[in-house]
Image (cartoon, rainbow, N blue to C red):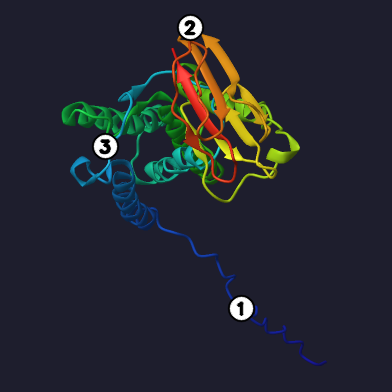
Amino acid sequence: MTDQHPATPHPPTPHPPTPQPPTLHPAAVRRVAAVAFVLYLLVLTAAAFLPLPWQTLARGEGVAYDLALRRPDLLGGWEAQRNVLMTVPFGVLLPLVVRWRYEVLVLACVAVTLVIESVQLLVSLAVGWPWRSFDVNDLLLNTVGGLLGLAATGAVLAVLRRPALPPVRRLVPGALAVALVGWAVVATAAAPAAPVLADACAQRPAGAVTPLSDGEAYAGDDGSVCLVLGGGTAAVPPDSPAGAAVRVQDEDGTWEVGTARPGEEAVDGRGAPVELLEVEGSPLRVWESRW
């Protein structure tokens, strides 16, 4: 008989280790975020406070504060968009730099813009003329920008960490923040379309626009004076006689806007003479009067 020897087991062939995706160390992320946050604060300070009052040649006119809250429009021109975008990095970076509770982060987004607006007001009062104004609408848009940035970072961290929801009483600041941002978004979506002008005024000029106290005037394609005012629009044909084109009456009194040709005698509704302002590209001149 032939001896049967048990088969010698062969060791399993080792498999190469599965490469793991690189991970960022929290401390490294915090250091990078801290550097970016400091640089951002320097840029924010320069944007909010430069040029300084003694570096400004032309002094501003008007009041040093505006407390009339208007409907927010996040797409209402570069000024509104700038006020939103300038605080988005604050909300994005702050949660990566500090370990605060989320309701404190929400309050910080409000506090940073409140401090900026308050300093601008105090400096304006100190120098005796409106170098910068305290505008409650800027405060609103800045806060919305900070909350949007905070929401973006919070969403990413929530996916990575999956934290438990805080107690209901701690959700109140977040609910108020969501309501504020939601109001701004809904108000923007529901904003009325820009008024449609007459055909001659459909194309805005590339040249000068004559500013008015609550609107502007420019020349249409046929020489008409196109008026874009707070309450609507009007187109005054180039052969129109001197007189008022728009009259608005409100709690502040009466506001008239009219046209006349150079050399014509122009008076407002009270019979008082008015100053004619040139409208580049039109034979007419524009005037306005309040009483």
Q: Amino acid at mark 3?
A: Arg
The local crowd at label 2, few if under 14, some if 14 to 19, many if 20 or more residues have their Cα within 10 Å, is: few
Tell me the number on the disc at residue 14. 1
**Camera-nearest residue between 226 and 191:** 226
Q: Is residue 47 above or below residue 73?
A: below
Residue pointed to by mark 2: 251
Mark closer to the chain start, 3 or 1: 1
Q: Which residue is drawn at the image coordinates 54% and 27% (left, top)?
A: 72
Residue 232 image position (x, y, % from top left)? 63, 24
Determine contact: label 2, label 3, CB under 8 Å: no
Label 3: state its secondary structure: loop
The local crowd at label 3, few if under 14, some if 14 to 19, many if 20 or more residues have their Cα within 10 Å, is: few
Q: Is residue 134 above or below residue 268?
A: below
Mark closer to the chain start, 2 or 3: 3
Residue pointed to by mark 3: 59
- How far is mark 3 from mark 1, CA to CA? 79 Å
Relative horizontal placement of residue 213, taking residue 192 as reference (left or right):
left
Q: Amino acid at mark 2?
A: Glu
Residue 198 image position (x, y, % from top left)? 73, 34
Relative horizontal placement of residue 6, taking residue 185 as reference (left or right):
right
Determine contact: label 3, label 1, CB under 8 Å: no
Q: Which residue is drawn at the image coordinates 58% and 36% (left, top)?
A: 284
